[in-house]
Image: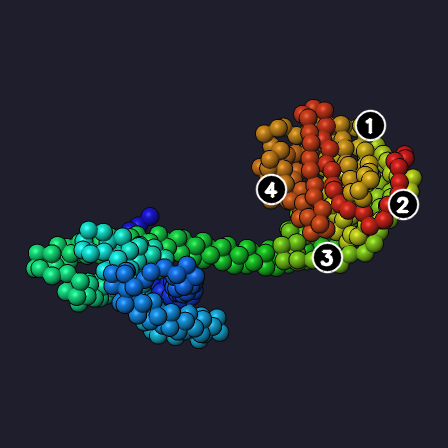
């Protein structure tokens, strides 16, 4: 922490911190003012209630006058602080007036402690406890700029000098008392500057964090916009290339070697389109806060996805579905959730050997919590990679058993979509034994047991 003992804070933050600290000071004036007023009233009520013989108390008349004066003046401080806080909240702060009020109140608290010391002690320098209490309260609870601290210290010493001759005679005693006051005011200055430094340092750190967060949000938004634009614009030339490749494929005069080249062009276009779709999905998921959802019966929904994979996409990998014997309903975006399932099934197939099984299992517990398991018996995920499996462009991205490549976006998209449905996804895996992804959501209607 940097200590601003004889300096001010950096120019860039000075004005906003002054405005912020002045508002906090006004709120402190209100709180301390209310407490001080209640103490004054309570003290007077106690004297009356217990019939304390006050006439024999030394300096009672001065104390009585001071108590009445404080009880009258403090409500004005509280009222003014409330009015000025309201001006801040309306966006029309009266900064100079607010600072002046805080300074006067700070001096009032110092003066009150000083005055109490004079009232209660025969010789103030023998015990300046109340003076010290006023100093500590003012220095600790208020945030004063360097020049404000100096003004308060000088004003307090002047008040002390003006009051002292009424309570103490003798040049040596007056000098010793003044030295005691100066020591206390040095303590006041030190505490005040350390309190200021602590608050200023924390405030500037918070502002720096806010600015960095704003920069990150702006950069993320621009990145997503650029990502969407680039990905969208790449689709057109890829589509044209694929159309030309299809036309070449239909040409019967093309030889076998060129046919293989055409197939490679089509496969490359499909791979590039899949990457573009992932990029666009990532950009959209970052931008969209909510999905349009509908009520879906999960058994039929998942079975339809599994049938589609079994017919068109799995090659030699078997996909088994285990559902429930009663309907289970939940709210999902059917298109987005299909992308989740396609991605998880694709991963399971990619890391499974031919003729191995991929299991899709739907479960629901007695509390209406839905669990969808996607389990394979393939190569598994190394334990060191598991913490990064859902990261965007994850370091856990690997080639499939048949050489399939990945850009590391799929599982990141899956996690985004599931969480925007109010659910969660977990993974458990043992290397060389397989992996299970479990999606957790909430049912809207259920009454079921598992069936195959």
Image x and y of residue 75, in percent? 41, 71
The CA distance from mark 2 to mark 4 is 34 Å
Give whichever of discs 3 and 2 has the lower sequence position: 3
Q: Quadrant of residue 97?
A: bottom left
Label 3–label 1 contact, CB within 8 A? no
The answer to whether residue 169 is left or right of residue 75 is left
**Residue for badge 3:** 291
At horizontal 81% and vertical 33% (from top left) the residue drawn is 359
Choose top left, top right, bottom left or bottom right for residue 424: top right
Q: Can residue 198 be seen in this snapshot?
A: yes
Expressed as whole percent of the image width and height from the top left, the position of residue 320 reads: 85, 34
Tell me which residue sits at (71%, 55%) in the image. Answer: 239
To which residue does mark 1 refer?
Answer: 355
Front one among 57 and 65: 57
Q: How far apart are marks 2 and 1 (CA)?
A: 31 Å
Instruction: State yes or no: discs 1 and 4 in contact (Cβ < 8 Å).
Output: no
> Which disc is residue 327 wearing?
2
Residue where numbered disc 4 is placed? 391
Q: Where is residue 443 in the image (x, y as percent from the top left)?
A: 81, 47
Camera-side mark, 3 or 2: 2
């Amino acid at each position: 922490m940097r200590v601003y003992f004889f300096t001010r804070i950096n120019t860039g933050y000075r004005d906003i911190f002054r405005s912020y600290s002045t508002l906090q000071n006004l709120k402190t004036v209100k709180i301390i003012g209310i407490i001080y007023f209640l103490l004054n009233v309570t003290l007077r009520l106690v004297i009356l209630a217990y019939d304390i013989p006050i006439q024999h108390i030394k300096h009672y008349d001065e104390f009585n006058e001071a108590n009445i004066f404080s009880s009258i003046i403090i409500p004005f401080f509280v009222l003014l602080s409330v009015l000025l806080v309201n001006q801040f909240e309306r966006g029309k702060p009266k900064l100079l007036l607010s600072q002046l009020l805080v300074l006067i109140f700070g001096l009032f608290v110092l003066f009150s402690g000083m005055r109490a010391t004079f009232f209660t002690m025969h010789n103030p320098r023998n015990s300046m406890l109340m003076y010290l209490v006023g100093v500590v309260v003012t220095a600790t609870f208020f945030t004063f700029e360097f020049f404000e601290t100096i003004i308060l210290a000088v004003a307090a010493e002047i008040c002390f000098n003006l009051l002292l001759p009424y309570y103490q005679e003798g040049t040596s005693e007056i000098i010793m008392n003044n030295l005691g006051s100066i020591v206390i005011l040095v303590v006041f200055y030190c505490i005040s500057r350390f309190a200021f430094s602590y608050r200023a340092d924390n405030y500037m750190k918070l502002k720096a964090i806010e600015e960095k967060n704003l920069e990150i949000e702006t950069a993320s938004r621009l990145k997503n916009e650029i990502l969407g634009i680039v990905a969208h614009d790449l689709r057109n030339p890829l589509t044209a290339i694929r159309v030309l490749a299809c036309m070449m494929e239909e040409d019967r005069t093309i030889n076998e070697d060129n046919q293989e080249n055409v197939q490679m062009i089509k496969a490359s276009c499909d791979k590039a389109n899949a990457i573009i779709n992932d990029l666009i999905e990532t950009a959209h998921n970052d931008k969209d806060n909510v999905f349009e959802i509908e009520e879906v019966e999960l058994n039929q929904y998942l079975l339809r996805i599994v049938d589609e994979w079994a017919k068109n996409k799995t090659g030699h990998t078997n996909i088994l579905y285990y559902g429930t014997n009663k309907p289970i309903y939940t709210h999902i975006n059917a298109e987005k959730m299909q992308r989740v399932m396609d991605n998880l099934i694709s991963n399971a197939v990619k890391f499974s050997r031919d003729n191995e099984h991929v299991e899709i299992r739907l479960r629901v517990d007695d509390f209406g919590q839905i669990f969808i398991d996607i389990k394979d018996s393939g190569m598994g995920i190394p334990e060191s990679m598991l913490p990064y499996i859902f990261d965007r462009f994850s370091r856990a991205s690997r080639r499939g058993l048949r050489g399939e490549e990945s850009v590391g976006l799929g599982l990141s998209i899956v996690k985004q979509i599931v969480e925007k449905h109010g659910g969660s996804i977990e993974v458990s895996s043992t290397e060389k034994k397989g992996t299970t992804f479990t999606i957790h959501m909430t049912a809207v209607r259920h009454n079921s047991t598992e069936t195959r």
